[in-house]
Image: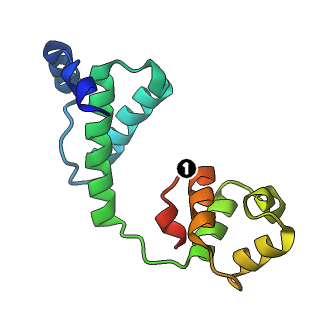
């Protein structure tokens, strides 16, 4: 969000949202789940339909959730092809579904099996395709 968008926030409306949702750093699973439910409510509206106040609240709660989850569920370092295989499995994808990212079935197979490293350009394509940071693949 740009600085201009933050300037457009109506303090009274934002204050009402804060009072209604009471976002605070979660200390327990239950508190984190409550924040996740609030985020789901906002996301169900569609990001393009959020008011500036709702967008700011969403950003705040997301930051709180991420901090909690990084602390309580650290992700061990994984090799790029392992991350790729996990994302493919989670989304029900097969190698043929990502061939267009690499240009050939052979290169796709070598990358998925770990026989070939993922280049920076390929990592960017994968990041855009899976909507994650390209750094996960490098």
Quarter of the view holding residue 60:
top left
Q: Is residue 73 left or right of residue 71?
A: right
- Figure coloring: rainbow
Q: Nearer the viewer, residue 38 or 130?
A: 130
Residues 120 and 31: in front is 120
On screen, residue 42 versus residue 68, left or right, reads right
Which residue: 50% across, 67% down? 136
Residue 23 placement, left or right of 88: left
Q: Quadrant of the rendered structure where residue 11 is?
A: top left
Outermost residue on the bottom side: it is 115
Mark 1 Cα-neighbour bin, 10 Å: few <14, some 14–19, many ≥20? few
Residue 40 vertical position relative to residue 129 in the rendered view, above or below:
above
User: Where is residue 5 shown, x and y percent of the image?
Assistant: 27, 24
Specify whether 60 is left or right of 83. left
- 6 to 49, vertically: above or below: below
The quadrant in which the N terminus is found is top left
Q: Tell me where residue 76 appears, x and y as whole percent.
A: 43, 76
Name the residue carrying label 1: 131
* Residue at left offset 64%, top offset 58%: 90
For the image, the number of numbered tags is 1
Q: Which of 5/83 is in front?
A: 5
Mark 1: which secondary structure? loop
Q: Residue at x 76, y 79 (%)?
A: 110
- Identify the residue at image location x=28%, y=47%: 63
Query: Image quarter for residue 125?
Result: bottom right
């Amino acid at each position: 969000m740009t600085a201009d968008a933050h300037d457009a926030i109506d303090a009274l409306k934002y204050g009402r949202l804060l009072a209604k949702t009471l976002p605070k750093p979660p200390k327990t699973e239950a508190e984190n789940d409550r924040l996740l439910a609030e985020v789901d409510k906002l996301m169900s509206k569609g990001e393009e339909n959020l008011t500036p106040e709702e967008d700011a609240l969403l950003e705040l709660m997301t930051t709180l959730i991420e901090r909690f989850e990084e602390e309580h569920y650290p992700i061990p370092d994984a090799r790029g092809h392992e991350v790729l295989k996990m994302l493919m499995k989670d989304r029900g994808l097969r190698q043929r579904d990502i061939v267009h990212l690499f240009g050939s079935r052979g290169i796709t197979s070598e990358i998925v099996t770990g026989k070939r490293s993922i280049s920076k350009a390929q990592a960017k394509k994968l990041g855009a395709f899976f909507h994650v940071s390209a750094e996960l693949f490098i």
